[in-house]
Image (cartoon, rainbow, N blue to C red):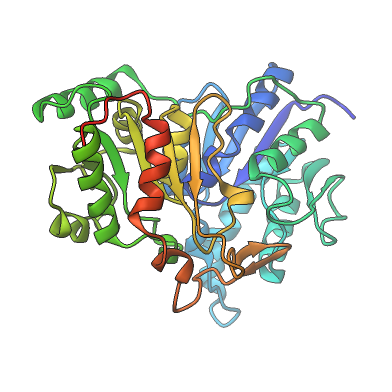
Amino acid sequence: MSTPRRLLAIKLADLGDVLNITPALRALRHTFPQARIEALVNPHTASVLQGSPLVDEVVVFPKTDFEGLSVLRPQAWHPLLAHLVALRRRGYDTVVNFHHLTTPLGRLKQRLLIAATGAGVTVGLDNGHGRWFTHPVPDEGFGARREVEYWLALAARLGAVHPDTSLHLPVSAADHATAAARLAQLGLNPRSFVVLHPGSGGYAPARRWDPPKFAGLAAALYRRYDLPAVIVGTATDDVPAVLAAGTSPLHDFSSRLTIRELAAVIARAALFVGADSGVMHIAAAMGTPLVAVFGPTNPLAWAPWTPRSPARVVRLGISCSPCAYVGHRVGRRHGCPERACLADLDVAAVLAAASELLADRRVTA
C-alpha cells in the first residue's frame, strides 16, 4: 500500500461524533506528515476542526440539503452533482470513512459519495455490507468497542498510530479571554463553579434528564460545595425550564457562546454534568471532571472518552436500556414513551457521582 498523498476523512455527523475522530486524525497526521489531510463535515460542525493542526482543510458538505431528493425534480440534484464533481477534482488517493454502515439508504449514500472521490484506497467499517472498501475493518456492532476505538482502528489499518488518544478541540487565546471575561463579570473564578448542560441537541431529545432534576442537582452542589451553576446550551435545550425550577444561583450562558468559547468556559469549571451530547464530549476534550447521564443510548459506544481526566457515567442499567444503537441497528433512537431509564433516575445518584469527583473540596453541608 502506497503512502497517502491526499487523504479525505469523512464524518458527516454531529459535534460529538466529529470530536471522537480527532484521536484518529492525530494518528494520521503523525504517521503521514507530508500528506494533505482534509475533512468532509457538516456545516454546523466545521468549527470543531477549522484551524486544527490535525487537518489541512475543512471541506463543508451540506448533507441535510440533499435529503429527500426526488427523481420527479431532477433539477434539485444539480447542487449535489456540483459538490460531487468538486470532490472528484480534489484528487484524493485515500478516503477514510468514519461511519457505520447501518441503514440501507445510508450505505447507498456513503458508497456513492466515496465512489465520487475516485480514490484508489478506501478504508471503512465492514458489518457485512462494507466488503467494497479496499481496506475494511470489522464492525462488531455498536458498543462492542468504543467509537473512538473504531476510528483509531481505521487509522491503524493504514499503519497510522499515536500514543496520545485524547480528544482534540483547538481553543484560541481569544476564546479563553472571552470566557474569562464573561465569568469574571459574575465573580466566577476558575474551579469556583460547575457547568450543567440539560440538553442533548436536536437529534435525540430522549437523552435528556428532567430539568427540575438538574435544578435540584444545582441546589445540592451549591449547598454542599458552595459551587454555583453555569447553565449552557441552545434555545431548545430546556434551559428555561431549569432556570424556572432553580432554588440556587444559576447563571444562564445558553446561546451566548461559540463552540470554542463554550469549551473555554467548561475548561475553567470544577465539574461538568450533562447528558449524552456533543457538549459532554467537549467537556471530555477539555479534560474537565465530568458526570455523563445516560438513558436510551449506549454508553459502551459513546461514554466520555477521557484517557487523562476523571469521568463517571450514571445510568440505571434497567434491562431495556440501552435501546438505541445496539448491535448493528439504530434501534429506538427516540427511546420509549415511558423513558424509565431517565425518569426514574434521581438526583441522589447523580450527586453521588459528582461528589466522587469533588471529593477534595470541603463539604459544607
Residue found 39% across the figure and 56% down from its top: 201
In this picture, residue 299 sits left or right of residue 243: right
Residue 49 vertical position relative to residue 180 in the rendered view, above or below: below
Quadrant into which the N terminus falls: top right
Q: Quadrant of residue 327?
A: bottom right
In-front residue for pair 8/187? 187
Residue at far front of view: 365
Residue 150 is situated, as x and y percent measured from the top left of the image, at: 72, 42
**Could you tell me residue 285's position as x and y percent?**
48, 31
In the rendered image, residue 9, in percent from the top left (x then y), is placed at: 65, 39
Question: What residue sits 22% from the left and 26% below the top?
Answer: 192
* Residue in the foreground of this view, choosing between 332 and 60: 332
Front position in the image: 104 or 66: 104
Res 195 quadrant in image: top left
Quadrant holding the C terminus: top left
Residue under the image location 25 percent in, 40 percent down? 221
* In this rendering, position of residue 53 left or right of residue 243: right
